[in-house]
Amino acid sequence: MTAADLAAPAAAPAADVVQAVDWVAIAPPTVVAVVALAVLVADLFLPPRRKPVLAWAAIAGLVAALATLVPLRAGDRSTFCLTGTPDACSYTADHFTLAIQLLVLGGALLTALLSVALTRDELPAGEYWFLLLSSAAGAALLPASRDLATLVVALEVASLPAFALVGLKRGDRMSGEAALKFFLSSVTATAVTLLGVSFVYAATGTLHLTEIAGQLDDVPAQLGTLAKAGVALTLVGFAFKTAAAPFHFWVPDTYVGAPLPVAAYLSVVGKAVGFTGLVLVTVVAFPSYADVWGPALAVLAALTMTVGNVAALRQAPTRALSAVRLLAWSSVGQAGYLLVPIAAAAYSSDDQVGATVAYALVYAVVNLGAFAVAAVVARTHPANRIADYRGLYATRPVTALAMGFFLLCLAGLPPGVIGLFAKVVVFSAAVDAGLGWLAVVMGVNVVIALYYYLRWTAVLFRAPEAATEEAEAPVRHRVPAGLAVAVALTAVGGVLLSGYPQLVLRFAATTLF
C-alpha cells in the first residue's frame, strides 16, 4: 500500500466539514437585519427634514422579507446541519417556521405603519427603526432555530431592542418605569432559561433539539434529577416571555408606558416569540418529559386566562389609559387560550400545536387592528379611556365599525366568525386530549370576556355627550396615511379570514414538524 492510499481515506471526511449556506432559507431574517443596519447608517447622513425616508425604507424592507417566504413555501429547507447527521440542523425552514415568520414579519409591518406619524413627531426616527427591525430579525430567526444556543440568541436579539423601544419616549417617567420593569423581568427570565439550558446540556451532551429528544430517553440515573430540573427551569423561563400567570406582572404597566405601536408590537410579535420558543422546547426537544410539562402548562393555561379576563373585567371606563390597560389584560387572557393546545400536545398523539399557530394568526390580525384604532382615538384623546370611545360611530363611522368588528372577533361572536372558529379549534384540542376540566375553565372565561368586549363595543355606538361651553366637542383630525392603511389592512384581513377561515384553520389539521 502506497502513502497516497493511506492518505486518501483521511482526507475524505475533511471535505464534508465545510457546508454550503442555504441563503434562500435564511433570507427572511437576513433581509430584515441588513435593512436595520442600512437604516442605522443612513440616519447618520440624512438631514432632519429627510428622516421620514427611513420609515418607508423600513416598511419596504419588511415587505421584501415577506416576499422571501414565497420560495420557501414547500417547507423542506434546512442549513447549518451536523456533519453526517442531516436531521440535526441549527436552522430549519419548515411549515411551522414559515407560519410564524409570516406572523412576525406581518406584525412588524403593521407596527411600522402605525409608527410612521409617531417617529415623525415624537420619537427619534433612526433609533426607533433600527431597534424595531433588529427585534423583528431576531423574532424571525427564532422559529427556525433548532438548537438551544441559536434559540437563546434569537430570543435575546428579539427582546433586547424591545427594552429600548419601550423606554424611547425621552422625559416620560411612565415610559422609563415600564422599560425598567420589562427589562428586569426579561433578564430574570433569560437567567432562568440559561440555567435550564445548561442543565439540559449537561445531562444530554448536545444542544440540537432533535438530538436532545433522543438523549433524554436514555439519561443515566445519576443525571435524571439534573435533566428534570433543566426541563422545568427552561419552561419557567419561557413562561415569563409568554406572560403566563403568575409571571405576567410586567404586562399592564409595560403596555401603558410604551408608545402605542410598541405596545401593539409586544402584544403580537413579542407574544409569538415566547410561544414559539415554548413549542420548540416542549414538542421538539422534551417530548419524553410530557408527563412533567403537560400538567404544568395545563394549570398555567387555566390560571393565565382567568387572571387576564378577571383583571380586564375590572377596568374602569373613566380611568386614564383604561383602553390600553384593558387590551393588555386581554392579551394575558388570550395567552391562556394559546397555551391550551401546547398542553394538549402532551396528552395526545395528534399534532395539536397547529391549533396554537392558527389561533395566533387570527389573534395577531384582530389585536393589531384594535391597537390601530386605539392609536386613531389617541390623536384626539391622549388619555385613551374607554369612555373616550363613546359616540365614535357619530364622528368616525368606518373606524367605529372596524373597532366593533375587532372586539367581536376577540370575543368570538358573529360577525367575527374567525374568532369563534379559532376558539372552537382550541376548545376541541383540549377535549380531544382528555382535558375536559380545562375546556370548562376556558368556556367560563370566554363568557367573562364577552362582557367586557361587548361593553366596549356598546360604547362605540352610544350617542356622544352634548358639548358644553366648558368642554367643546373635539375637533376631528386627519388620520395619517400609515395609520389609515393599518386599520384598513387589519379590517380587510379579519373580514377575509371570516369568509375563508380555512386560510389559517388548516394549520390546526396540518403536521407542522
Image (spheres, rainbow, N blue to C red):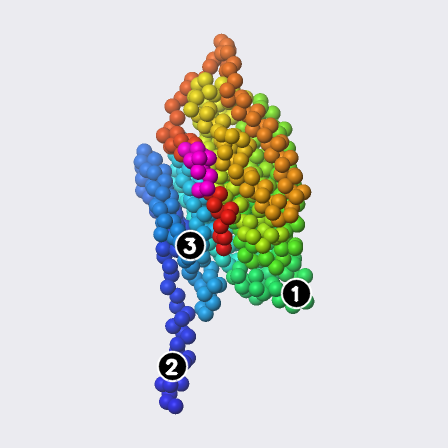
Residue 199 location (% of width, % of height): 61, 60
Badge 2 amino acid: Ala
Could one spot residue 473 in this view of the protein? Answer: yes
Q: Which residues are magenta?
A: 492-503
Q: Quadrant of the N terminus?
A: bottom left
Q: Amino acid at mark 3?
A: Gly
Name which residue lies at 65% across and 46% down: 435
Residue 40, x across and y down, in percent: 37, 45
Give 341 or 60, whichever is nearer the viewer. Answer: 341
Tell me the SS state at disc 1. Answer: helix
Q: Residue at x 65, y 58 (%)?
A: 228
On screen, residue 390 versus residue 6, left or right, reads right
Density class for disc 1 (Cα within 10 Å; few <14, some 14-19, many ≥20) is some
30, above or below 461, in the image:
below
Residue, disc 2: 8
* Mark closer to the chain start, 3 or 2: 2
In the image, 433 versus 184, the foreground residue is 433
